[in-house]
Image (cartoon, rainbow, N blue to C red):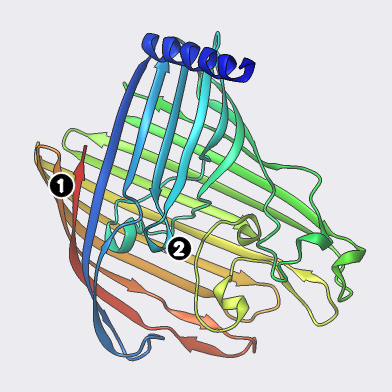
Amino acid sequence: MSKILLVVALIAVSMSLFAQAQVTPYGSARVGYWFNMYDEDHPLGKRVTNDFMLQVNSRFGVDFRNEGLTGKAEFGVGANNSISLRLLWARQQFDGWSLLVGQDNDGTSIYANQAWGHDNSLIGYGVVDGSRNPMIRFAMDNGFYIAAMPAKTSNDPANNTAGIDAILPRLNIGCNLRLNDGNISLQPTFVFQMYSYNDDFGAGIDGTVISYLLGATADFRFDAMTLRTHFNFGSNTGNMGYRFGSGHGSDRDVNPNRATWTADNKTEDATTLGGFLMLGYDMTSTLNFNLGFGFANTSHKDFDNDSTKMGLYLQSTIRANRLRIVPELGMMMEGDSVMDNADSRVALGNNIYFGTQLRLDF
C-alpha cells in the first residue's frame, strides 16, 4: 500500500509541475526518393539505383520549459525502422551561466543542408559527425562553453576495449559568438581525447593515442543571401568516433582517420583536413536555393598517398505551410583510396544523383 501511495504522490507532483510548465510536442516526417548513377570505378559497379525510404532523420520530440529550466526529449528512426533515442537533456539557467546534463550534440555538429540519402549533410565529405553523446556542459551567457563526454575506445582498430585505459573524459571547448545583430556568427571549437594500451591489450602494442579536432565555422547573412564556411583539422579523429571520410577495402580504408600500427607495433597518427562552403539565397518567403561543396583529406605517416573525397550539391526548398519539397542534384566524388600496400591506389569512382525529399513538420 505504501508503494502505491508513493507512486500516486509522484504522479501528482509530476502533473502539478507539468501544469506549471510549457510543454511543446513537435515532429518531422521525411521521405527521400533518390536516383543514383554510379560509374565503373565505384565499388558497386556501373549501375543505376533508386532509393525510396523513410529517412532516419525523421523524429518526434517534446520541448519542456519552466522558468529557468528547459529540457528536450527526442526520438528518431533507427535500423529496420526501430525507435532510437536522439536527444534527452535538461538545462538549468543560473545567473550568467547554464548547466546541461544529458545527451546532446557537441560543438562539432555543424552541417550543410544536403538532403540526399538520409540528410547526409556532406558528412564524410568535409563535415565531421560525432553523433549525439552523453555529456555535462557548462556554458556562459557570453557564448563560451566546456563539455565533458565519455571517451570513445570502441573505435580503436582492434576493438579491444579491455586492453585500453582512458582516464580522462573527452573534452570539448568552444565559443558561440554573434555579432552585427546576429547577422554574423563565429563558432570555434576544440575536442581532445587520450587513451593508452595496457598489458591486457596483447600483440605487443605499445603507446598512447592522442586525438584532437579543431573546427571553425563562420555564418554570414546579407539580406536574402546566407554564407556558411567551415574548416576542420585534426589527428586520429576516428578514434574519437568522428566520421570524417570513408572508403572501401581494408580496415584502414573503412576508417582512414584512425591511428594505425606499424610493423614494429607502434602507433602512427592519421591527420585529417576538411571543410565546406554553403551558399543560400531566399528568392521568396517560400522558395530557397542552396549550393554546397565539401572536401575531406586524410593522410597517414606510414602511407605514401592520401585519401580524398569531395561532395557537391544544388537544391531548392519549396515551402507550403508545414510541407517542404526539396529537389536536389549532386555528385559524390570518392577519389582514390589507399589499400594495405602504401604504394597502391584504388579508384573508388563517383556517384551522380538526383531526387527529392518530402518533409512534413508537425
Mark 1–mark 2 distance (CA, rounded to whole Å):
25 Å
Task: Find numbered disc 2 in the image and state the secondary structure of the residue it sits on.
Answer: loop
| Vertical side of 18 occupied by 313: above or below | below
> Quadrant of the rendered structure where residue 50 is?
bottom left
| Vertical side of 2 occupied by 331: above or below | below
- Point out the tag, 1 or 2, that comes first from the N-terminus: 2
> Quadrant of the rendered structure where residue 327 is?
bottom left
Q: Nearer the viewer, residue 91 or 233?
A: 91
Task: Find numbered disc 1 in the image and state the secondary structure of the residue it sits on.
Answer: strand
Q: Type of residue at label 1?
A: Arg
- From where the camera sits, is residue 343 visible? yes
Kindly identify which residue carries mark 2: 124
Indicate which label's residue lies in the foreground, 1 or 2: 1
Kindly identify which residue carries mark 1: 324
Q: Type of residue at label 2?
A: Gly
- Residue at (84, 76) in percent of width and height: 265
Dot 1 crowding, Cα within 10 Å, few <14, some 14–19, many 20+: some
Q: Is residue 270 left or right of residue 32?
A: right
- Residue at (25, 62) in percent of width and height: 313
* Residue 30 percent coordinates (x, y): 24, 52
Q: How many marks?
A: 2
Quarter of the image that includes the N terminus: top right
- Residue at (49, 88) in percent of width and height: 346
Q: Is residue 6 left or right of residue 223?
A: right
Dot 2 crowding, Cα within 10 Å, few <14, some 14–19, many 20+: many
- Residue at (39, 55) in percent of width and height: 276
